[in-house]
Amino acid sequence: MSSRRAVAYLAITLTLLAATAVALDRWVWAPAMISTAQRVDFARRLPVPPLAPSHRDSRGRRVFDLRAQTGEHDFGSGPVRTEGYDGTYLGPTLRMTRGEQVVVHVRDDLPEATSVHWHGMRVPAAADGGPHQLIPPGRSWSASWRVDQPAATLWYHPHPHGATARQVYHGLAGLLIVDDPATTIPQLPHEYGVDDLPVIVQDKRFTDDGRLDDTSAPLAGIGLLGDTVVVNGVTGPYLPVVTRRVRLRLLNASNARTYDFGFTDGRRFALVGTDGGLLDAPADLRRIMLSPGERAELVVGVDPGQTTVLRSYPHPLGTGRLGDRFVGGDDTLDILQLRAAAILRPSPEPPRTLAPLPRATRAQAVRVREFSLNNDAINGQPMDMGRVDAAPVAGSTEIWRVVNDDGIPHNFHVHGVQFQVLTVSGAPPPPQLSGWKDTVYLPPDEPVELIMSFPRHPGPGLYMFHCHLLYHEDSGMMGQYAVTDPGADMNTQAGH
Ligand code: C2O
Ligand code: CU
Ligand code: CU
């Protein structure tokens, strides 16, 4: 080969390599990052889900009715086929008080089976609404329990095995607020829809012909990542603020996306509550990260006439600089604009202490269990509705040591309890993980130790624990536990 020819081949090879690099950058790397910063019009007033009506029955129980149905909903640019509870998208906010007995009748008017799970609620297994409590189309199911936990922002959503992601994505989700008269804090904003607001954050993708696109993000391995954020069911919302402070009850009801929330002007906020209740003291923060299923209650102050935008910032997800790009870690998403009126009603500062938060200690635990999340399974076993993976004793306290061995984002949710985070990678938890939690993000290879006590409830049955990235949950990254009576044999308790 002449040297001239060799040079020509080299030039061609280099050109092809460069072209490949450009193409990779252009078609794979660059589009994997989404930014809507300053590109959202904030033209729609934030809708507030109505409070669900309820009545007292002859036994003094508070009774709610919910109907899962299909509908057409306008997120902001025309009607889209959706699903909702008592409406076309999302559902009313259920509000209940500690100590009362509640009953929820759920009717399934969808063309397929569903279930309704009360995420974060301490309930008997038969009322939990997991995959074992399926409601066939056209039928009803009733759940009843006594509310016995601190004031908190919880939520409800379907849980039929294999179909949870699709049903939640199409709109089946709602907020559930627990009030506790013993720890009511008058200094916290508490007028629902005025200075105390649900902020249900979800990401969507729409097809060209205006349907909800539920195909998975390429390369992500975590399911659906949307390019459009909807809050309480609308795109580009603004919130008219009429008081000096507002309380935002943030819920990440997205299928797979994590958010790192903050304000565009860098203002700080008080984190007052996490998944399962108020913190013992407000934490002064600038950012709060929420993975799917997690909640946070923030109190944010504004001055008259100000506007600021709640935004989700790029944040490390632990999968490396390359990996994070494909799982949403580099994305910037504008969420909600706060627009303060020219004259604001005064609101007090949050108090220095909030609610009692008894610390669980390692010494209380009677048992440590290990859970490794990997390859659509937990401890190597994909979800099996006929298998019991753990049988903790009622009234006992356990430490669950959970590790994501998978190299992609996962989180961990446990039904039926609220836990405390003992350690993350061996270190004590940051303020945002220091209160009651039921869902926690698992950065790859960073073990998280959770401590929890299993309440005693009437009746047997199963509770789930799983990754709350809904595609993973549907694909089998879920296990089941049965709470056993002290002294009983698990094999006689767990049957169903
Ligand atoms: Cu939010 Cu098993 O659920
Ligand atoms: Cu749950
Ligand atoms: Cu997962």
Image: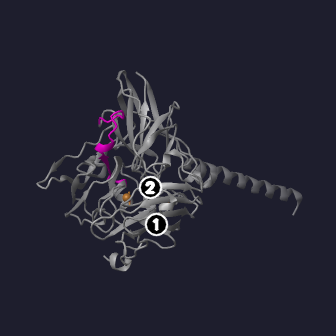
The relative height of residue 116 versus residue 378 in the rendered view (above or below) is above
The relative height of residue 40 versus residue 423 in the rendered view (above or below) is above
Separation of residues labelled 2 and 1 (CA atoms): 14 Å
- Label 2 or label 1, whichever comes before in sequence order: 2
Label 2 crowd (10 A; few <14 / some 14-19 / many >=20): many
> In this view of the protein, which residue sits in the foreground, 116 or 435?
435
Label 1 beta carbon within 8 A of ligand 3: yes
Q: Circle 2 sits in a helix, a strand or a loop, which is it? A: strand
Residue 114 in picture, x, y percent from top left: 29, 62
Residue 112 in picture, x, y percent from top left: 27, 64
Q: Circle 1 sits in a helix, a strand or a loop, which is it? A: loop
Q: Which mark is residue 439?
A: 2
In-image side of 439 versus 25 (left or right): left
Q: Please give the residue where the numbered disc 1 appears in the rendered image.
A: 477
Q: Is residue 178 magenta?
A: yes
Residue 461 in picture, x, y percent from top left: 32, 70
> In this view of the protein, which residue sits in the foreground, 271 or 175?
271
Label 1 crowd (10 A; few <14 / some 14-19 / many >=20): many
Residue lying furthest top: 342
Which amino acid type corresponds to the residue marked 1 in the rendered image? Met
Which corner quadrant holds the N terminus? bottom right
Q: Which residues are drawn in magenta?
A: 169-191
Q: Residue at x 37, y 79 (%)?
A: 491
The relative height of residue 386 versus residue 32 in the rendered view (above or below) is below
Which amino acid type corresponds to the residue marked 2 in the rendered image? Thr
Residue lying furthest left: 58
Q: Is residue 34 magenta?
A: no
